Amino acid sequence: MNQTDQMKRQSKDLTPEVDWLEKNDMESGDGIPLGLILCAGKSSEQVELLELEQSGIRVAEYLTELPPRELLKKKLHQAIQSARRSLSTSLRHPRDAFTVQSSG
């Protein structure tokens, strides 16, 4: 089974769970439920083919090996800056603190 087929199967397995959470486990002020598929490699084309934008399911890549030290430091610094911006925004707009925002 190729990677696109695996992601397709996982999204079909995850969709009912995300839907159930949205219908049965949300409280006032909650952001939409989020399903996450982790994979060792992905391409934007593969993800686009799955048409997951409206489903609340995201695909993320994980590393099987650490990148070079300098690249890792750069990526960690970017993640920290992004988290600080997000926290700053959520403190100004607490109602939106846990809303999932698209990165596209």
Image (cartoon, rainbow, N blue to C red):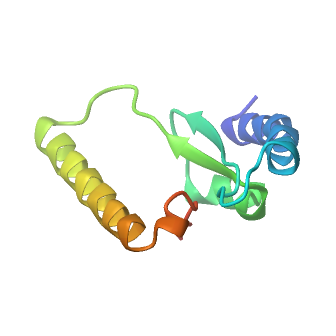
Left or right: residue 86 versus residue 84 is right
- Residue 87 pos. (x, y %): 34, 60
Residue 70 vertical position relative to residue 85 in the rendered view, above or below: above
Tell me, yes or no, if residue 20 can be seen here.
yes
- Residue 18 pos. (x, y %): 79, 44
Indicate the quadrant containing the N terminus: top left, top right, bottom left or bottom right: top right
Residue 14 vertical position relative to residue 90 in the rendered view, above or below: above
Count of marks placed on residues:
0
Which residue is at the front of the view, 67 or 20?
Answer: 20
- Residue 59 pos. (x, y %): 60, 47
Residue at 54%, 67% in the rendered image: 95
Residue 90 vertical position relative to residue 1 in the rendered view, above or below: below
Quarter of the view holding residue 15: top right
Residue at 70%, 56% in the rendered image: 32
Left or right: residue 98 versus residue 2 is left
- Residue 74 pos. (x, y %): 17, 51
Residue at 84%, 34% in the rendered image: 13
Left or right: residue 49 versus residue 77 is right
Which residue is at the front of the view, 71 or 57?
Answer: 57
Which residue is at the front of the view, 68 or 97?
Answer: 97
Left or right: residue 27 versus residue 65 is right
Residue 52 vertical position relative to residue 19 in the rendered view, above or below: below
Quarter of the view holding residue 100: bottom right
Which residue is at the front of the view, 50 or 81?
Answer: 81
Tell me, yes or no, if residue 103 can be seen here.
no
Residue at 57%, 58% in the rendered image: 44
